[in-house]
Amino acid sequence: MIGTSDMSWRWLFIIEGAATVFFACLTAFVIPDWPATTKWLSEEEKALGIIRLIEDAGEEETEIETMDAFKMAAKDYRVWLCILGQVTFHTIHPGKARN
């Protein structure tokens, strides 16, 4: 890329970004919203797709309050092992953690 004032890396990002946006817009029209609206599936395949989506949805999950989730994490030994590992690593290798 001669004559770009050493900005060829910027042009690289622009070209790759434009290709990404183009394909994202293209796939928005190609990917079906629901199996029943798909033109290239048979009726049997559409029914199977709908059944699988319903089965994957499962039951409604109850939300856990933030404080309850924090308490659960504080009681979990794996969280404390992870914290211990991080503290140990950063104590032994302080220079590597900053780079």
Image (cartoon, helix red, strand yellow):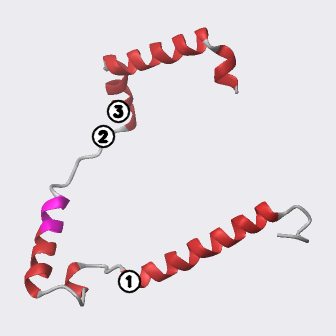
Q: Which residues fall within the magenta stretch?
A: 52-57
Q: Quadrant of residue 2?
A: bottom right
Magenta span contains residue 1: no
Q: Which tag, 2 or 1, sits closer to the chain's start?
A: 1
Label 3 – label 2 distance at C-alpha: 6 Å
Q: Position of residue 41 (x, y in %)?
A: 18, 85
Q: Quadrant of residue 52?
A: bottom left
Residue found 70% across the figure and 27% down from its top: 99
- Residue at image mark 2: 64
Residue 55: numbered disc? none
Q: Quadrant of residue 55?
A: bottom left
Residue found 80% across the figure and 64% down from its top: 8
Image-based side of 48 in relation to 66, left or right: left
Image-based side of 88 in relation to 35, left or right: right
The residue closer to the viewer here, 9 or 69, is 9
SS at mark 2 in the image: loop
Q: Position of residue 9 (x, y in %)?
A: 77, 61
